[in-house]
Image (cartoon, grey):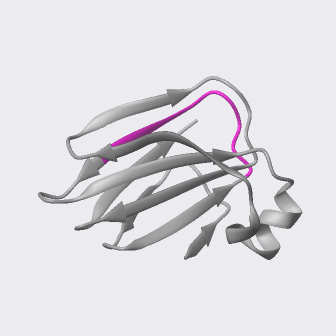
Amino acid sequence: MGLFADTGSVHEIAAETSAVILRLRAPFTVAVHPAPGAAATIEVSATPTALLRADPAAGRWVVLEAGVAAPMLVSFPGPVTGLRLQSAGGATVFEVVQ
């Protein structure tokens, strides 16, 4: 699992992997671009950043969008401490903008 503290960037997530972005400011938008056959999942967390940094898997995650198989934009109005991006069945490119 990749762990990023940057936003406003592009993240290509390989199949069957995930990445976590910390310290998001609200609002934010994620552009999701799954490859053919891929399904993307976007989750948010309010778990304290220090805990996510130590072990992202221990965070409490809430699904924002799941099974995304076509390009789409996902916006979130509130502050969160973490954003987890996952891809299955193929790679997915995520563009995060704040």
In the image, residue 1 sits, relative to residue 73, either above or below, namely below
Q: Nearer the viewer, residue 11 or 41?
A: 41
Residue 57 lies in quadrant: bottom right
Occupied quadrant, residue 39? bottom left
Q: Which quadrant holds the C terminus?
A: top right
Give the vertical position of 22 relative to 32 (above or below).
below
Vertical relation: 2 (above or below) 35: below
Which residue is rendered at x = 36% and y = 74% of the image? 16
Q: x, y (%) of residue 32?
A: 33, 45
Q: Is residue 83 left or right of residue 52?
A: left
Q: Which residue is painted at 14% across and 59% down in the image? A: 37
Give percent across and percent down for residue 95: 41, 48
Q: Residue at x 30, y 59 (%)?
A: 92
- Name the residue at 36% across, 32% down: 73
Asked where in the image residue 63 lies, by quadrant, the reply is: top right
Q: Position of residue 49 (x, y in %)?
A: 83, 57
Residue 55 % position (x, y): 76, 74
Residue 24 within the magenta-colored segment of the rendering: yes
Q: Is residue 59 magenta?
A: no
Label tally: 0
* Residue furthest out toward the left: 36
User: Which quadrant would the N terminus be assigned to in this image?
Assistant: bottom right
The residue lying toward the viewer, choosing from 26 and 16, is 16
- What are the residue bounds of the magenta stretch? 23-32
Query: Depth check: 88 or 33 in front?
Result: 88
Query: Position of 52 compared to 84: left or right?
Result: right
